[in-house]
Image: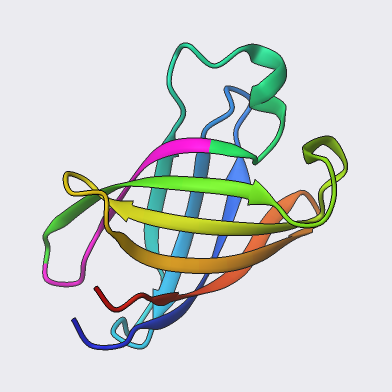
Amino acid sequence: MPNVIGNFYFKLTTAGHLLGEYSNSGTPWARPECAFRGDDVPYAERQSFVGTYTSTWHEPTGSTVTVTLTIVPRYRPAEQATLFELTWTRRPGGSVMYQGQAMLNDGQLVGNYQSVDS
């Protein structure tokens, strides 16, 4: 896979899922990405971006990609976090596809990512 560098934003829904868009060195415009958090996650944990999601997006080629997205806080406890680290992991296989960093901006998670050699 060629080196991919991109950016994204996510909004947290009232149900605790993510809706957003991404662009990168291989896309001529922003593309949608959404992430679902399992039904077994307690309501209190759904009020934060921190967690594990099943994330899906459509490539410009038309193919659909589904991965595990993990968001963890940087430096602070999760309830105080304003900076985050993100990892997109292939399903199946478990190898890391992308790594990124993000910050809270007006209630949205805004950040950048790049591909990981595997």
Q: Quadrant of residue 9?
A: bottom right
Horizontally, residue 32 falls left or right of residue 105, namely left
Residue drawn at 83 percent across, 41 percent down:
77
The magenta segment is: 52-61
Residue toward you, 11 or 50: 50
Way the structure is coloured: rainbow
> What is the chief secondary structure element of the magenta stretch?
strand
Horizontally, residue 93 falls left or right of residue 94, namely left
Q: Is residue 55 magenta?
A: yes
Q: Quadrant of the N terminus?
A: bottom left
Residue 90 location in percent, x, y?
25, 53
Residue 28 location in percent, x, y?
32, 85
Q: Is residue 19 magenta?
A: no
Residue drawn at 57 percent across, 22 percent down:
15
Residue drawn at 16 percent across, 44 percent down:
92
Residue 96 location in percent, x, y?
33, 61
Q: Quadrant of residue 58?
A: bottom left
Q: Is residue 112 above or below residue 13?
A: below
